[in-house]
Image (cartoon, rainbow, N blue to C red):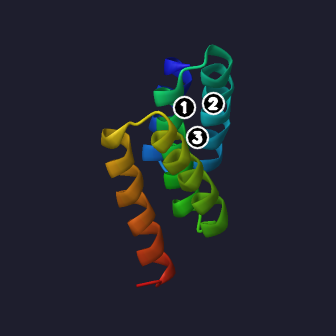
Amino acid sequence: AYAYTGLGLIKYKNADYYQALAYFTRAESLWQEQGEIRSLIQAYQYFHDTFLELGQFKKAEEYINRAIQMAKEVKAPDLQITNLQRQSALYQREGKY
C-alpha cells in the first residue's frame, strides 16, 4: 500500500492525474483490507488533491469529507488540521468564500 501511495504521489507531481488515481485506488483497497485508518485518511486527502486538480470539485469534496469524518472518529487532530486546510482550498477554488 505504501508503494502504491508513493507511485500515486509521483504521478500526481507529474500531472498524470488519472494514473495517480489508479495507484491511490489500489492503496485504498489495501489500507481498508488492513484496517489502517490513518493511512486511509491520508489516501483520501490525496484523492481530494487529485480531483481538485482535475476540476472535479464534487468528487474532491466527497473524499475530503470522508477524511474529515474518519479523523473525527479516530481522534486524529493532526490529520484533521490537514483535512480542514484542504477543505478550505477546495472552497477557495470553487469561489465559496
Residue designated by label 3: 20
| Residue 66 against residue 30 in the figure, above or below | below
* Label 3 close to label 1 by CB (< 8 Å): no
Q: Given the image, on which type of amino acid does mark 3 rest?
A: Ala
Badge 3 marks a residue whose secondary structure is helix
Whichever of callouts 3 and 2 sits on the residue coming sooner in the sequence is 3
* Label 2 close to label 1 by CB (< 8 Å): yes
- The residue under the point 56% across, 55% down is 65
What quarter of the picture does the N terminus occupy?
top right
Q: Nearer the viewer, residue 15 or 29?
A: 29
Residue designated by label 1: 40
What quarter of the picture does the C terminus occupy?
bottom left
Whichever of callouts 2 and 1 sits on the residue coming sooner in the sequence is 2
Badge 2 marks a residue whose secondary structure is helix
Q: Quadrant of residue 59?
A: bottom right
Label 2: how many residues lie within 10 Å, few (<14), some (14-19) or many (20+)?
A: many
Which numbered mark, 3 or 2, is in the foreground of this view?
A: 2
Any part of residue 92 in sight: yes
Label 1: how many residues lie within 10 Å, few (<14), some (14-19) or many (20+)?
A: many
- The residue under the point 67% across, 34% down is 25
Which numbered mark, 2 or 1, is in the foreground of this view?
A: 1
Q: Given the image, on which type of amino acid does mark 1 rest?
A: Leu
Q: Is residue 25 left or right of residue 49?
A: right
| Residue 3 image offset from top left, x and y in percent | 51, 19
Residue designated by label 2: 28
Q: Nearer the viewer, residue 26 or 39?
A: 39
Q: CA distance from mark 3 to mark 2?
A: 12 Å
Q: Mark number for residue 78?
A: none
- The residue under the point 54% across, 47% down is 69
| Residue 37 image offset from top left, x and y in percent | 53, 27
